[in-house]
């Protein structure tokens, strides 16, 4: 064989090998297990958009296995085990509530938590800088955020003396919320008590207790259960004239009084960054847990009027969004 023919043949073989390798790489479909205690929320679309911006398209190079408990949080351990059996490439947990059973189910499959609640305090992360093991993500419970919520509430209700925390005790980090709120309220000469809901059926008893005791206001802690029941909670608030403050604007958009917290859409989109890094080879422990740096104050002035409240101009001036 002549040298020129050999080179041509060699180049042809190498080109064919390269094309075959490229085709094999292009055919790779990553499998993500999405685990959440709620149903499919609008934030999932933000997460998918974040992935799309990074080059992942569901049905092309991405497949997602959804495990959604729809408020039946006792099913989360079983659902986490199912994702492990499916051998997904990565597990994305909506909150700490889903992340903890996922962490128990596997020590090898990477886990990304989209909105942790006191991840270090509940043992989810070893630290924010080095989360440890196979897990990382975003921490949504920022220092002093509950104090700021109560401060804004005080602006609308200057005479507030009794505040109730409505929360799910099984949700990791809920006690941290109570401690933060209690400390902040005490500084403002107010008292804080709490009402628990563990299942959707518990809301009737919780609402009856609120009607019986008539607190000045209610601080609702967001978890899978309360987010799933957000319209029911907001409707109760407006119907019975009990002001409520929330963590996220999704409640205020339905008629809640006001909220202060990070954007859930931004958090879920940022979660796609972690997924991309890990799928490209990064280890979860090398990706520090992030905390949101941007918080939005959203006020529903129509609801304020319906509750007989006046929102001071100073508060309206700093609001990120005003719903009329």
Image (cartoon, rainbow, N blue to C red):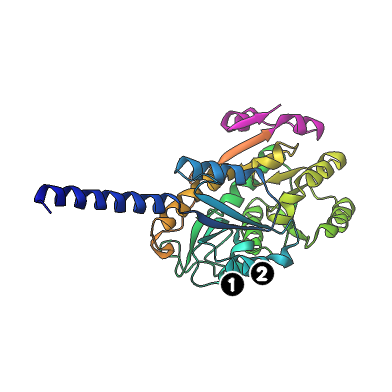
Give coordinates of residue 34: x percent, y percent.
60, 56
Q: Nearer the viewer, residue 110 or 171?
A: 110
The boundaries of the magenta stretch are 300-324
Q: Nearer the viewer, residue 211 or 294?
A: 294
Report the residue that reaches farthest toward the left.
3
- Whether 49 is drawn above or below 284: the answer is above
Give coordinates of residue 292: x percent, y percent.
50, 48
Look at 85% across and 50% down and name the residue there. Answer: 214
Whether residue 284 is visible: yes
Whether residue 169 is visible: no
Whether residue 309 appears in magenta in the rendering, the answer is yes
Q: Nearer the viewer, residue 300 or 231?
A: 231
Res 282 → quadrant: bottom left
Which of the two labelled residues, at mark 1 and mark 2, occupies the earlier sequence position?
Answer: 2
Quarter placement of the C terminus: top right
Q: Residues within 10 Å of mark 1 (few under 14, many from 20)?
A: some
Q: Is residue 75 left or right of residue 8?
A: right
Whether residue 299 appears in magenta in the rendering, the answer is no
Quarter placement of the N terminus: bottom left
Does dot 2 land on a helix, a strand or a loop? helix
Look at 33% across and 49% down and name the residue there. Answer: 19
Give coordinates of residue 318: x percent, y percent.
57, 32
Does dot 1 land on a helix, a strand or a loop? helix
Residue beneath label 1, please?
Answer: 105
State if disc 2 and disc 1 touch (CB < 8 Å): yes
Give coordinates of residue 62: x percent, y percent.
52, 50
Q: Is residue 72 left or right of residue 56?
A: right
- Whether 39 is drawn above or below 123: the answer is above
Report the residue that reaches farthest toward the front.
1
Residue beneath label 2, please?
Answer: 77
Q: Is residue 249 left or right of residue 306?
A: left
């Amino acid at each position: 064989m002549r040298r020129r023919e050999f080179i041509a043949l060699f180049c042809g073989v190498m080109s064919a090998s390269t094309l075959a390798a490229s085709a094999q790489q292009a055919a790779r479909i990553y499998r993500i297990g999405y685990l959440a205690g709620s149903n499919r929320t609008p934030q999932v679309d933000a997460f998918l958009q974040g992935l799309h911006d990074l080059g992942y398209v569901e049905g092309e190079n991405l497949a997602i296995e959804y495990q959604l408990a729809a408020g039946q949080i006792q099913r989360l351990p079983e659902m986490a085990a199912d994702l492990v059996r499916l051998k997904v490439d990565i597990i994305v947990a909506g909150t700490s509530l889903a992340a903890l059973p996922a962490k128990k189910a596997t020590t090898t499959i990477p886990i990304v938590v989209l909105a942790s609640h006191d991840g270090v305090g509940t043992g989810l992360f070893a630290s924010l800088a080095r989360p440890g093991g196979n897990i990382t993500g975003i921490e949504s419970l920022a220092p002093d955020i509950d104090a700021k919520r109560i401060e804004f509430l005080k602006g609308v209700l200057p005479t507030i003396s009794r505040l109730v925390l409505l929360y799910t005790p099984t949700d990791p980090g809920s006690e941290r919320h109570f401690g933060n709120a209690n400390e902040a309220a005490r500084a403002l000469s107010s008292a804080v008590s709490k009402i628990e809901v563990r299942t959707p059926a518990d809301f009737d008893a919780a609402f009856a207790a609120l009607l019986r005791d008539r607190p000045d206001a209610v601080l609702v802690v967001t978890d899978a259960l309360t987010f799933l029941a957000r319209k029911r909670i907001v409707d109760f608030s407006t119907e019975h004239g009990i002001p409520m403050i929330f963590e996220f604007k999704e409640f205020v958009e339905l008629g809640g009084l006001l909220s202060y917290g990070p954007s859930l859409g931004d958090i879920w989109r940022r979660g796609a960054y972690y997924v991309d890094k890990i799928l490209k080879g990064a280890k979860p422990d090398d990706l520090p847990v992030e905390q949101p740096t941007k918080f939005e104050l959203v006020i529903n002035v129509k609801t304020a009027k319906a509750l007989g409240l006046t929102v001071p101009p100073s508060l309206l001036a700093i609001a990120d969004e005003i719903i009329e």
